[in-house]
Amino acid sequence: GRDDALKLHARYLTAKLIPLGFRRSQQVLILFNDITRQKQARDELDEHMLRLEEKVSHKTARYKEIHLEFQKELAYRKKIQRDLESALEQVKQLRGLLPICASCKNIRDDNGYWSQIEGYIEKHSDVTFTHGLCPDCGKKLYPELFDTDIEEP
């Protein structure tokens, strides 16, 4: 292999020893094969492979970062979407013109029926009414209970 190569004057050689078939002879035939081009090509290939592996490693790390950022952004957007959907479920909105009687304050619905304003608003929103009396109405309706001349302790 190339690890067995001998370097001789910037050339890479492999040697093969072939014993000559004489019994007591110590003669061998040495065949040299110049593998300089193959070694240079292999070294260049190894260098390119190393650079390629470094690029792939760098790109992979960057893509992992981008993927993580994307996952965080996606989770954030999904949370916002859930929050918006939840808020939308809780909001009922009255829009447009609302016909109301100038005297009794009843509301006319889309079918032409008149109903008390409280019932109409409760039906079309998430509002529940409680009833009380403002001071002016209290004085008119129940003057004995809403007498302003009596001071409370």
Image (tube, helix red, strand yellow):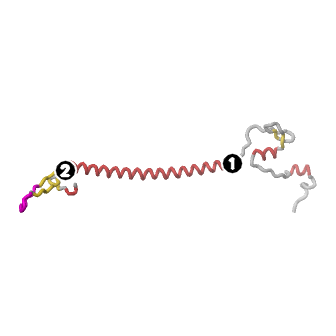
The stretch of residues the image draws in magenta is 21-29
Residue toward you, 151 or 34: 34
In magenta segment, residue 106? no
For the residues labelled 1 and 2, the Cα–Cα distance comes to 78 Å
Q: Is residue 44 left or right of residue 118?
A: left
Q: Which residue is mark 2?
A: 35
Decide which of 137, 13 is in the foreground and name it.
Answer: 13
Callout 2 environment at 10 Å: few (<14), some (14 to 19), or many (20+)?
some
Residue situated in front as seen by the camera: 148 or 3 = 3
User: Residue 35 in the image: x percent, y percent?
Assistant: 19, 50
- At label 2, the amino acid type is Ile
Q: Residue at x 38, y 50 (%)?
A: 56
Residue 29 is marked as: none
* Mark 1 element type: helix
The quarter of the rendered structure image containing the C terminus is bottom right
Q: Which residue is pictured at 83% across the width and 42% down the height?
A: 115
Which residue matches tag 1?
Answer: 89
Most frequent secondary structure within the magenta stretch: loop
Residue 141 is situated, as x and y percent measured from the top left of the image, at 91, 50
Tell which tag, 1 or 2, sits nearer the viewer. 2
Q: Identify the residue at horizontal 62%, vertical 50% (top origin).
A: 82
